[in-house]
Amino acid sequence: MVWLSKRGIRTAVGFVIAVMVAIGLAGPAHADLYWANFGGSSIDTAQLNGTGAQVLVAAAGTNLNQVSAGTNGYLYWADFNANAIGRAKLDGSDAQPLWLTGADQAAGVTVSSTHIYWSEDGNNRVSRASIDGTNADPNFVTGLTSPHGLALANDSLYIANTGADQVLRAPLTGGTFEVLANVTSPQMIAVNSSHIYWTNFRGETVGRSDLDGSNPDEGFIAAPSGSWTYGVGVDSDYVYWTNYTGASSVGRAGLDGTDVDASFIGDLSFAAGLAVVPEPTIASVTPDRGTVDGGTRLSIRGTGIFENAVVTIGDSACTSADWKGSTQFDCTAPGGQLGPESVTITNPDGQSATAVNAYTYIKADPTPTNQAQHPLRSCATGPRAIPAAGTVRLMKARCRTDAGQLVNVKVSAKQRSAQTRGDLQYYRVIRKPNGKVLLRTFGYPLSIKVTWSASKTSGFKAYKKVQRYRS
């Protein structure tokens, strides 16, 4: 097995010296792929597009296996020879190769927001502790046979039970497990919403099955001849794996197994465990408006949100951050200027997501409660004239007043109804999904009325503007 062949390359003395001189190197601004470089005793990194490959943590250990990223902004790795779990921040700082010790021949590691899990080849078990390393449960799952790769998904722990040629699943309560698939020497494992992926060490393939273990395909992706597949990771678009020997690279393929690039990142030295950190996403910002004074409490929902992320509205950072998990981040809006601003969330590794014009600054309700409101940035000025034939804009996209109210447009005809007469149509109002409104006319004389309006608030009167046109 791999740990025997690698153990002969590094000695215990060499490991001690390596730890004594271990340093954390600043990573790239957007580090998305991380892998264990056995040949260089380091943790390396590159951007998700394969560029910028460099050492992240030098002298990280001597027999580095699985690598996993936590939502707390730390990267973790299993060191088989040192019987330890190492960790460092995603930028390479605060490197601690012996962060958690006593893990007998640690092979796999994975983390949730609350716990860290690791497999122990020496004790044939999976252990667990709180995310800070305390409250260890050494016998979380027992009765295994040379367990290696671990993955957390769908409220379950997935285990590559290498010595028994099995892919297992265990509940997060621990103890019991079920056999999902019988496959050849699964080394490392990754899971997404639809499939389980594993590497077949010395088998030159990446395998795949459905989440319940059905439809196993051990040759789902073929690596180059002599390339022992080792680490594996997955994001929304690709499967990534490491070729430990042969190609000595990080490979990549589409989720359906096509577009295989076995040397996506080449010229490596015995690449082992692999972690993929997808970019965060923003699905919604609630509420979508607040006063220019700031102080509005926001909830940003999405995916891949890390602890210690930073949220900015325009150029200003939110305050009083409260991380609710990888799908929600709450904070308090800073003050700003009237109008829409983009919302950006940036993870500790530098990856970010932006929701354009997702938050609008409005005036605070005045006293007394009868102040007029006006459309922002002339978004509802209307055209100077309407031609008998052609298209004009009646309102810009995402049109709000300075009180934060959405503006509506209504068109009515004083002469010649908008209804068709036979096959004739005199005009059409076109409403875009973003709120932009257009008027298209078809070459007939018109006399129409356009009305822009917005509802009142507790501090502002209703807005209404009427303009008449003759074509």
Image (tube, grey):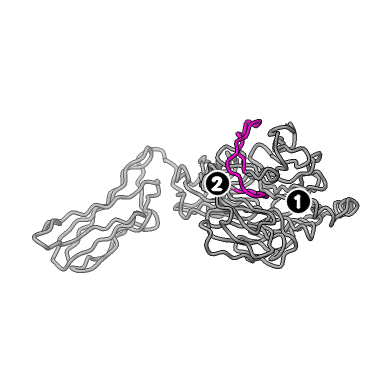
Mark toward the start of the polypeptide (2 vs 1): 1
Find residue 22 and name its label: none
Q: Is residue 422 magenta?
A: no
Q: Nearer the viewer, residue 375 or 15?
A: 15
Number of marks in picture = 2
Q: Is residue 28 left or right of residue 294?
A: right
Q: Nearer the viewer, mark 2 or mark 1?
A: 1
Find residue 1 and name its label: 1
Q: Are marks 2 and 1 in contact (CB under 8 Å)?
A: no
- Residue that appears at 29% across and 50% down: 408
- Residue that appears at 80% across and 51% down: 4
Q: Mark 2 to mark 1: distance in Å?
A: 56 Å
User: Residue 270: percent from the left, percent from the top?
Assistant: 74, 60
- Please say if 135 is above or below 187: above
Question: Which secondary structure, mark 1?
Answer: loop
* Crowd rating for badge 1 (residues with CA inside 10 Å; few <14, some 14–19, many 20+): few
Q: Is residue 139 left or right of residue 459?
A: right
- Please say if 274 is above or below 285: below
Quarter of the image where one finds residue 43:
bottom right
- Residue that appears at 70% across and 50% down: 67
Please tell me whether the stretch drawn in magenta is mainly helix, strand or loop: strand
Q: Nearer the viewer, residue 30 or 427?
A: 30
Q: Residue tagged by mark 2? A: 334
- Please say if 93 is above or below 156: below
Q: Is residue 175 magenta?
A: yes
The amino acid type, in three-letter code, at marker 1 is: Met
Report the span colored magenta. 167-190
Quarter of the image where one finds residue 223:
bottom right
